[in-house]
Amino acid sequence: MKSYERFLKYVAYPTASDEECPSCPSSEGQWALARALVEELNSLGLEATVDEHCYLYATLEANVDTAAPTIGLIAHMDTSSEASGENIKPRVIRYEGGDILLNEEKAITMRVEDYPVLPYYVSHNLIVTDGTTLLGADDKAGIAEIISAIEKIIDTGAPHGKIKIAFTPDEEIGRGADLFDVEGFGADYAYTVDGGRIGEIEYENFNAASAKIKVNGVSIHPGSAKGKMKNAATVAMEFHSLLPADEIPEKTEGYEGFHHLLSMHGECECANLAYIIRDHDMTLFEKKKAQFIEAARKINEKYGEGTLLLTLTDSYFNMKEKIEPCMYTVERARQAMLDEDITPVTVPIRGGTDGARLSFMGLPCPNLCTGGENFHSRFEFISCEVMEKITDILVRLLTNAAGLDK
């Protein structure tokens, strides 16, 4: 089965993770997809299981006698909640250039002016949404490419060492590696297949933290409020104004870090803000966290201690320091791409993957492309041709290793 055909099946499963749910997985749809994937992998001849926390593990035994490394491939089953993942209506279109009308009824168009990457995909078959939901390429495309690569290896009898596969829950809410069994997984090194444009290899990611703000106000009738009211909503806005205005996602790129206001809600009596904080450089990362601490101090100094409560929590760190001692993992991925006539490009991740956490847990884990564009968006799309080429890259990566020593 082609990887894009698998992908079209997987997007029918609504698997958005839920940060407010403390259980693992955080949404029931992830269980449904995991069970379907176990059945599919077992039908291909792998040993696949899903544990009590919805982590799927599978093994394809080696068919060579050499001391080849055991390589892992990892993707995540959940999708982002930033756009709806319910009732996704994917369709395949032949793209010949220009804007794409996604939804005639609702007049939703993906415009080249807004998405200048589109001309790269002229003459490709693109999988798009109807403009009302995300597509789910992040990371169901990775799952489809991994399974299709394994199927190709089995069907062709290509030589390979032991291959380990894992599909994780709740990556989008930063919990994908929380209960990952690194020792039981048993790979010498691994790759998350969770990136974007074809050719990209990533082994640098943001250091990441979250910030939760609670503002306690005092409500009273506005007619007699002078000197008595403390409006939590306006205090929250004042707090936000104390943060650097240009250090936000829409004004940064490359290695530039940011703070990002995820949500805000409140009334006079109480207000809440949720942020993420990101930077590749640890010194600048700590500086950004310090800006939050200083802004909170100023608010409490002005309005009284306890007015604003700040909770800062580190999420993950830059995997670069863990990958640099084993750069052969990156070089082998580059060679696999070159062997498939794809020019590899090393770029920093403006985000994170399970691989960042796993690298600090003792499993070196660079990130590879899936081919998806506009992740977490109603304008998400992916090329069928690119998905097949990435499948071939994974086959090459796994079979090239057959003659290597661990």
Image (tube, rainbow, N blue to C red):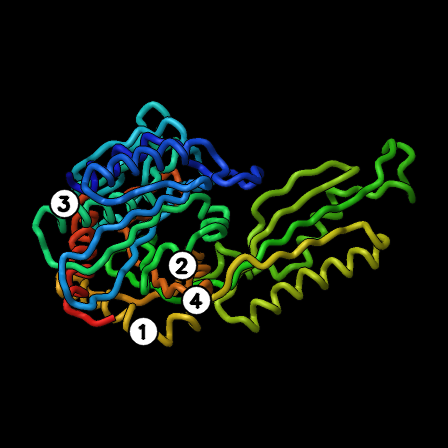
Front label number (4 vs 3): 4
Residue 123 circle label = 3
Q: In the rendered structure, which disc, 4 or 2, sits on the residue that comes first in sequence?
A: 2
Rendered image: mark on residue 327: 1
Image marks 4 and 2: residues in contact by CB distance under 8 Å: no
Quadrant position of residue 332: bottom left
The image quadrant where one finds the C terminus is bottom left
Contact? badges 1 and 4 (CB < 8 Å): no
Of labels 2 and 3, the one closer to you: 2
Task: Name the kind of residue labelled 3 in the image.
Answer: Ser
Q: Amino acid at mark 1?
A: Met
10 Å crowding of disc 2: few (<14), some (14-19), many (20+) = few
Which disc is residue 183 wearing?
2
Residue 182 located left or right of residue 219: left
Q: Secondary structure at mark 2?
A: helix
Upstream in the sequence, badge 4 or badge 3?
3
Question: What residue lies at 78% left-to-right and 56% top-to-bottom?
Answer: 299
* Sequence-first tag of 1 and 4: 4
Q: Are marks 4 and 3 in contact (CB under 8 Å)?
A: no
| Residue 255 image point, x, y percent | 44, 67
**Which residue type carries mark 2?**
Glu
